[in-house]
Image (tube, rainbow, N blue to C red):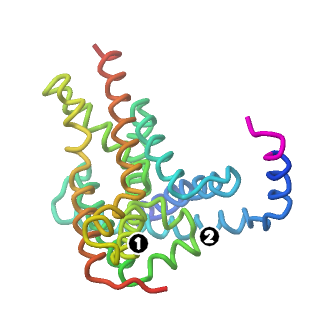
Amino acid sequence: MPQHKDVDYLALAAKHRPPTPVWMNAVRAFGVGGTVCVIGQLVTDFFVAHGQPASKAASPTAVVMVGLGALFTGLGLYDRLVRSGGMGGSLPISGFANAMVAPAMEYRREGLVLGVGAKLFTVAGPVLAYGLGSAFVVGLVRLVVGS
Amino acid sequence: MITGLLVAFVVGGAMCVLAQLVVDVGHMTAAHVMVLFVVLGAVAGGLGWYAPLVKWAGAGATVPLPGFGYTMVEGISRATKTEGVLGLLTGGLTAAAGGIKAAVLFSLGAALVFNPRA
């Protein structure tokens, strides 16, 4: 529980927080996120047209989208997409690559190991840790329930 | 094909709107929401809800991060069928290997090649 002073402070901070344009942000996230997914669908269609079964096209699509995300982050363009589209840029898997490249580039001056190597996983680390953790739990439940 | 693109746009966009609302209304950071949605994808996959969505919306469901959690769960189900309990440990990473390896490789490359700009 927050202490008395914290409650006062939080109320004060909430009063002075600039209003969030919730609707505008939602519309932008829809447009940007939808567009990224359409690009993903075009990539998927390309793989399917070239003999990949539809059920197996998701993996190479992820590879391409991650590559595009890393490339456009390097060029300084993906951060602009995230600034205007918010989660529309961050939620697609290309945004996962963006969350790896951006801090790694920024911290390069701190060295290749503790700068680039470590900062690659600032966001990717938690995503992988909790993704794999929850998938393990779900898989375990499925295994127990299924048998 | 046009219908497929339209469905991918609407479903993928809708997931991003949901994530944006969690950020704006729930006052969470993008990183927290990315973690949350991967976990939600894994749970939805386990409940059998996500597979039909993938079938219907294609990249609209596989490209957003919940698709990543779903992929891991599907991989574990597949692996436990052939390898038993060991599949719980091997299946998740095996299924997501392409995406993860690509992410590490491309990100490392991009971080080394490009210079940050303000």
Element at label 1:
helix
Q: Residue at x 20, y 53 (%)?
A: A53
Q: Quadrant of residue A105?
A: bottom left
Is the N terminus of chain B in the top left, top right, bottom left or bottom right quadrant? bottom left
Residue A99 spot, x, y in % from top left:
42, 65
Q: Are marks 1 and 2 in contact (CB under 8 Å)?
A: no
* Image vertical order of residue A127 relative to residue B7, above or below: above
Label 2 Cα crowd, 10 Å radius (few <14 / some 14-19 / many 20+): many
Foreground: B4 or A87? A87
Q: Amino acid at mark 2?
A: Arg
Q: Residue at x 62, y 70 (%)?
A: A28
Q: Residue at x 51, y 79 (%)?
A: A80
- Chain assignment, label 2: A
Which of the two labelled residues, at mark 1 and mark 2, occupies the earlier sequence position? 2
Q: How many marks?
A: 2
Q: Amino acid at mark 1?
A: Ala
| Residue A119 tag number | none
* Position of residue A104 in the picture relative to residue B118 (left or right): left
Residue B72 spot, x, y in % from top left:
31, 41
Foreground: A107 or B118? A107
- Chain assignment, label 1: A
Badge nearest the viewer, 1 or 2: 1
Residue B6 spot, x, y in % from top left:
48, 63
Q: Residue at x 36, y 22 (%)?
A: A141
The boundaries of the magenta stretch are A1-6
* Image vertical order of residue B85 relative to residue B30, above or below: above
Residue A51 spot, x, y in % from top left:
15, 60
Q: List the residue tagged with mark 2.
A: A28
Q: Quadrant of residue B85?
A: top left
| Residue A102 tag number | 1
